[in-house]
Amino acid sequence: MRLPKWSGWTIEIVMHRVRRAAAIVALLLSAAATGKAEEIPIPHSSPSDAQPSPASLSRYADLVPPATNTNTAPAPAGNLAYPAVGDTTPAPSASSTGEGMALHPGTGGAGRHRPALFNSVNTSRKVVALTFDDGPHAKLTPQLLDILRRENVRATFFVLGSLVEAYPQIVQRMAAEGHEVANHTWDHPRLPSLSTEKFDRQIRDTTAIIEKNTGQKVTVMRPTYGLYNERVKNDLLEKYRLDIILWSVDPNDWKKPGANTVARRLIEGAHPGAILLAHDIHPGTIAATPIAIAGLKAKGYEFVTVSGLLAMDEAPKPTPAPSPAKTAENKAPGAAN
Ligand SMILES: [Zn+2]
């Protein structure tokens, strides 16, 4: 490679980084200025709506006696070997990391972007991330994995640490078949109401048991019910270096509207960069999945893991501010997540 050309590239890269750093600092400043307004970003549903289904609750109760969580020795925070990413490190471009991220879901490399909160990803490509919360379920999740394998679709599972402990083989299978396994807390509490100690255990123990079973680094998480406050958000992003993943399409599958309705809502709601929300603990959702996949494929969509989708983000932002329309449309339900 000739030196003059190489030098030109270097200057271009440096200038690019400077511009990106300036943009990120500006965003951080504006985020700091508006931070207060973001404290409860997702309107609460009524308390009765916001609970998991009774079946789910009893299942959690059966599998997760309160003592279970404390039996796991918490690892020191320093053991979470996430790369130290400088505040102004430019995010990797999709072209340089998109393939790698897709092939190795959940793997955070040294060039990984600064953790942020996402409802969706800004891309013009017809890609969506199919996500399933609250599992693994002993019977339904293996059925879902069969469907995804048949359809050659990669998804992301936001699992509960307590259920990973109960069904480690299912989680091992998820990873072996190319899916991303992500943190959805240990036993589905409301994060803003936890003490720091309990919050830390929910996040740390869940990440640890996933990583033990998958061999993949956990880099993304979804708060239960989509609920967080400033403290929860800062800890997840800064202390645990986790992306906070909400959603842009919610079919309300937990209300059991029927498989065809769930599928139709997913297909009609899809958009480039969409994050689709579903739960692999409801039979109707499992039945809806092949219908939704067929409809989305017919519309030209491809499926990637959440980490794969994040790698395609054309404008990563530390704290993307959703538009008012998006907030109303996508965040309002937030009930059984
Ligand atoms: Zn949930």
Image: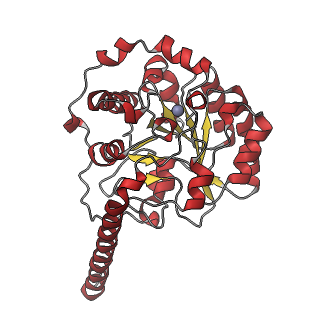
| Residue at x 30%, y 29% (from the top left corner) | 195
Residue 146 drawn above or below residue 297 = above
Q: Quadrant of the C terminus?
A: top right
Snapshot quadrant of residue 68: top left
Snapshot quadrant of residue 35: bottom left
| Residue at x 22%, y 36% (from the top left corner) | 77
Snapshot quadrant of residue 335: top right
Q: Which colour scheme appears in the figure?
A: secondary structure
Nearer the observer, 173 or 315: 315
Residue 283 image position (x, y, % from top left) = 70, 26
- Report the side of 229 relative to 329 (left or right): left
Q: Quadrant of the N terminus?
A: bottom left
- Report the side of 308 relative to 45 (left or right): left
Residue 186 image position (x, y, % from top left) = 41, 26
> Could one spot residue 57 in this view of the protein?
yes
Nearer the observer, 38 or 90: 38
| Residue at x 57%, y 26% (from the top left corner) | 52
Residue 128 image position (x, y, % from top left) = 60, 53
- Report the side of 267 relative to 52 (left or right): right
Nearer the observer, 144 or 18: 18
